[in-house]
Amino acid sequence: MVATIKRLAYNLWWTWNPEVGAIFETLSPYWWEQSNHNAVAVLRHVSDDELRARLGDEDFAARVRSSLEEFLTYMEQPETWCITKAPELASHPVAYFSAEFGLHESFPIYSGGLGVLAGDFAKSASDLGVGFVGISLFYRQGYFQQRIGANGWQEEFYTSFDPDTLPFRLVVDESGKPVEIAVEIGYSVVKLRAWLVTVGRAAIYLLDSNHPENEEHFRELTARVYGGDISTRIAQEIALGIGGVRLLRTLGVQPSLYHMNEGHSAFLTLELLRERLAAGRSLGEAQQDVRNRCIFTTHTPLPAGHDRFEQGLVQFQLGKFFQILGIPFEQLMGYGRVKSEDANEPFCMTVLALKMSRVSNAVSELHGKVSREMWHDLYPNVPVDRVGIGFVTNGVHTPGWGTLRAHEFWNKRLGFDWTDRLMGEKFWKKLQDPNFATDEELWALRYTLRRELVEFARRRLREQHMRIGGDGTGIFEQVLSPDALTIGFGRRFATYKRGPLFFRDWGRAVSLIVNSRHPIQLVFAGKAHPRDDEGKKYIQRIVEISRNPQLFGRVVFLENYDMNVARHMISGSDVWLNTPRRPLEASGTSGMKVAIHGGLNLSTLDGWWREGNDGENGWSIGSDREYPNWDEQDRVDADSLYQVLESKIIPEFYDRDEHGIPRRWIARIRHAMQTLIPQYSSDRMVGEYVTNYYVPKPAAD
C-alpha cells in the first residue's frame, strides 16, 4: 500500500478528488499548508516507517484503501467516452502544445487564464479517455510571487523550486540516462531535458534548459513564465515548438494531430515542415501535410496581444535552423506575415499558426466574430463571416474547482458519479427537485462557504499586515461578515478588465457597501503583469480603497492570487463580478467555476457570459453592444452595475421568508446550476474539439 500511495502522490488525479487530498493533509497538516497542498512534499517529510504505522489506524487505512481502489479503477477503466467516439485517439494521441499549464497551486508553472484552461483541458481529456500528450516548459522559478507594499504597490519576487518536491519525474531512457534533445537557437545548440507530469491518464512533458553543458544564459532560458525580453520570448518559443516536436520523436510518440493553444508554439509547424522536406516531399506537399495535422486555438482579441518579432531578430535566432531547413529566409518570413512579400511587416506567430493549420478556432462566439474581423486580410477573397476561424467556447474542469465541502455536499445528494456526468443536461435538471437538495440545505451550504472565505481572508490579511510592519492585533477579526452579500472579483489586473469600475461613482458605491440593513462586501485579488504599470495602479487603487476608514473590513484585497485563493473566492462569493470592456474578453472562465458552489454571475455581455446568461441564471451589466468611446462605455456600464445591484441583486438576496431563507435567490441558484454546469464544463469543451475538430482526421505520422 505504501508504494501505491507514492504512485498516487505523483499523479495529479488527486487534485480533482479532494477527499484524496485530505489523506495527505491528515498525514501532515503542517507540511500540507507549508507546501501549498503538495502531496509529494508531504511524503518527503513522512517516513515509510511512519506511513506504515499510521496505516495501523483502521479508520485511516480504510480511507486510504477506498481512495487507492478508486484511483486504480479510474486508471484501468477500459470503457471511456472517447472509446465510443474516437477510439483512434487512444493509440495516436493529440499533442497539445501550450506555453503554460495551470494544474494546481503547488505547481505554479502558469501565469493565468491560458494556463488554467490548458490544465483543465488535460484533466477533462483524462476523464474522457482522450489520448493526450501535453508539451510545455519547466519554469524553475514559475510566475512571480506578489506582495503588496505599504504604499499599495505590487512588488514581484521569484523563488526557485526544488524538483525533488514537485509531482513529476525526470524522463530517462532504458539505461536510466536522462533523455535529451537539442535545438538551434541563434548560432548555438541548446540541450533540453524533460520532466513528465502525470495527470490522470494524460501525460505532460516539460522541457528544461537547465543543462550543465548549456551556456549560462541558456540555462536560464526556461526559468520563468514569459520571463526576460523579446529575445528570451522568441527563444522560449523555439524551445517549446521545435523542441517539443523533437522530444515526441525521441520518445516514439506518434500524435494523430498537433493542437497549438495560442501562437507561442507555432514554430512546431516549421519543424514538421523540415521533417517532411527531409523525407523527400516537395514544398507544396510538405506544407499540405503540416496543415493536415495541425489545429490552432487563438485566445487574444487585441492585435497588440499577438507575438510579433522583427526580421533581424528572427534571422538571428532562427538563422541556423533556416540553414538546415534549406528554404530562403524571405520565403520563411512570409509564413509569419499577412502580406508575405512585405519586407516591413514583422513575423507574427498567430499568422504562422493560422497559415499552417487546417482548422482554427476562437474561444467564444463573440471572440470568433472579433477574430474573423481581425484576420480578414489573411483571407482577402472571402467574406468576413466566412473567414476560417470557428469557435469552441471554453469550459472549466468542475471537479478540480469544486472544494472538498462542495464534493461532500453533492456526493451525498447526487451520488459519487456526478463528476462523470458533467455533460448530462438531463442529469442536472435534478437540481430543480428539492428531494435532491432542499432550499434549507442549499442556504446552509452557501453560509458555510461564505464563512470559510471570510476566515480565509482574515488569515491572509493578518499575514499581509504583519509582513509590512503591523502588529497582528485582533482588528482582522472584524474584517468581512458571514452575513453580508459577498461579491468576488479575482483575475489578472489588465486594464481592460476594469478592476476599479465598481468605484467609478464613489458616493453611490459607498452607499451600497455601508448600508446598515442590506450591506454588501467585496473581495478582490489578482496580479498585474510585471511590466504593466497601469494594471498595478488599478491594484493600488483597490488597496487604497480597502484602507479607507469608511470601507475598512468591507472591501479587501488578497495578495498573491493563485489557484488556492481562487478556489476560496469562487466558492465563498455569492456573486462573481466580471467587468471587462467588451469585446476584449475572449472567453473568461472564472465565473464558470461558481455554479457548483451556488454562486451567481454578474458580468458584462462579453466572452462566455454573452452566451451563458439567459436572464434568470445571473445578471448582465450593460447591453449587447460596444461603444466607440471607452469613457462612455465605462460610464454606461458602471451605471448599469449600480442599477442591477440596487434594484435586483440586493433586494433578492435579502428577501427572506419567516425561516430566514431567500427563496427567490435559491431558485436562481438552482436554475444557474442546471443551465451552466453541463454547458460550461471542460468535458463539453474537449468533447466538441474531439467531434468537430479532431475527427475525422488524417492518419498518424
Image (tube, grey):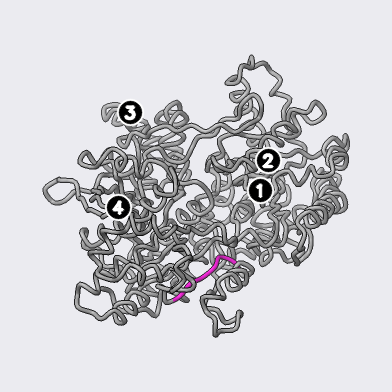
Disc 2 and disc 3: Cα gap in Å? 44 Å
Query: Real-space Cα distance between discs 1 and 3?
Result: 45 Å
Q: Residue at x 73, y 54 (%)?
A: 602
Where are the magenta residues, as a range?
A: 359-364
Which of discs 3 and 4 lies nearer the camera? The answer is: 4
Question: Which residue position holds label 1?
Answer: 495
Asked if the residues shown at circle 1 and circle 2 are in contact, with their CB atoms under 8 angstroms apart, the answer is yes
Along the polypeptide, which appears first: circle 4 or circle 1?
Answer: 4
Label 1 to label 2, Cα distance in Å? 7 Å
| Quadrant (top left/top right/bottom left/bottom right) for the N terminus | top left
Q: Nearer the viewer, mark 4 or mark 1?
A: 4
Which residue is tagged 4? 186
Residue at image point 67% right, 45% down: 489
Residue where numbered disc 2 is placed = 538
Residue 581 shows in the view: yes
Using the rendered view, name the quadrant where residue 458 is placed. Answer: top right
Earlier in the chain: of badge 1 and badge 2, it is: 1
